[in-house]
Amino acid sequence: MIRFEQITKQYPDGTVAVDHLDLEVQKGEFLVLAGPSGCGKTTTLKMINRLIPTSSGSLYIDGKPAVDYPLDQLRWNIGYVLQQIALFPHMTIEENITVVPEMKGWPKEKLKARAAELLRMVGLDPDIYAARKPSELSGGQQQRVGVVRALAADPDILLMDEPFSALDPVSREKLQDDLLRLKEELGKTTVFVTHDMDEALKLADRICLMREGKVVQLSTPEDLLLNPADDFVRSFIGKRKEEPAVDLRAAMEKPDAENEPAVVLPAFVEVRILLNALAEHDSVGVESAGKIVGRVSRGAAFRLLARMAGKGGTDDGGTHG
């Protein structure tokens, strides 16, 4: 869906922000670009919708060079969510959400229906919120509007540049949960930038960890935790707050061929995330290497956690962080 071939971005002062990047984002994948400040992750994101031009190399969108698309056509097909969401203060929430569809000539009835549909997706009653102005919403509510506004014209690609970093922890976790649900429902090809490894591990199908404009490791969250490529990766993972984690494969049953799991978790997952999922569902699917490999019932999970408590830690002898 998105392919970088030997992409470099060098600024006039000689600074190399991205250095010969080779990277491919598959259709429907949720890829997180992570790393310390100045590592090139935001520059990489902004080259996708041509907010920043490349210096050399080739960028392809859906098999076609990005430079061959008319700029407005390219950007209309790419939703974009920023850290500081810029809602138009003089417009209603409904009008904010439907800016791009209106520019594309959608009829009024369709605009209204689309805004209502998207507001419901993130738990905002359109009868209450559609006619309000941004100043009447909390920061978390405004950010929810920013996310669904990026989805309004049903783009194929969604770019998100640290969209939750300015929020309080409670609002941030709620929006992460909303995004996980939208990820499952909509299957958009998403590139998400963060410097927060907790957020990356929670949301990503794959994580691209960058340093000084280069990819240090590109892998699933599970593989990143279990098999860090070098000391930098181990150090960066170590900056996240330590939480107990569990390998669900120790309690796994065969997948239920007749019933698709409502929630799928990576095989190696933090206990907090597992408990949140089991509070809502009787079982969870288990994913490894991009495939559902089994399921874990609520009872089996609790028995596994009880064994962990008896041993004083995770099955492999300690907390991963």
Image (cartoon, grey):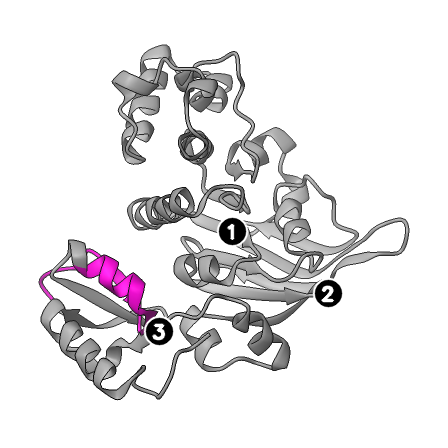
Report the front residue among 51 and 295.
295
Residue at horizontal 38 percent and vertical 49 percent from the top = 173
Task: Assign a secondary structure to mark 3.
Answer: loop
In this rendering, position of residue 284 left or right of residue 81:
left
Q: Earlier in the sequence, mark 1 or mark 3?
A: 1
Q: Position of residue 94 (x, y in %)?
A: 39, 18
Instruction: Give the crowd class for mark 1: few <14, some 14-19, many >=20 residues within 10 Å.
Output: many
Residue at horizontal 44 percent and vertical 29 percent from the top = 142
Residue 51, located in which quarter of the rendered image? top right
Which tag is nearer the camera, tag 2 or tag 3? Answer: 3
Residue 110, located in which quarter of the rendered image? top left
The residue wearing badge 1 is 192
The amino acid beneath tag 1 is Phe
The amino acid beneath tag 3 is Pro
Q: Position of residue 79 (x, y in %)?
A: 50, 37
Q: Position of residue 86 (x, y in %)?
A: 56, 27
Instruction: Give the crowd class for mark 2: few <14, some 14-19, many >=20 residues within 10 Å.
Output: some
The residue wearing badge 3 is 244
Report the front residue among 182 and 162.
162
Q: CA distance from mark 2 to mark 1?
A: 18 Å
Q: Residue furthest right?
A: 13
Image: magenta residue range: 257-278
Vertical comparison of 186 with 7: above or below: above
Vertical comparison of 55 with 218: above or below: above
Task: Assign a secondary structure to mark 2.
Answer: loop
The residue wearing badge 2 is 212
Q: Earlier in the sequence, mark 2 or mark 1?
A: 1
In this rendering, position of residue 59 left or right of residue 56:
left
Residue at horizontal 59 percent and vertical 63 percent from the top = 23
Q: CA distance from mark 1 to mark 3?
A: 25 Å
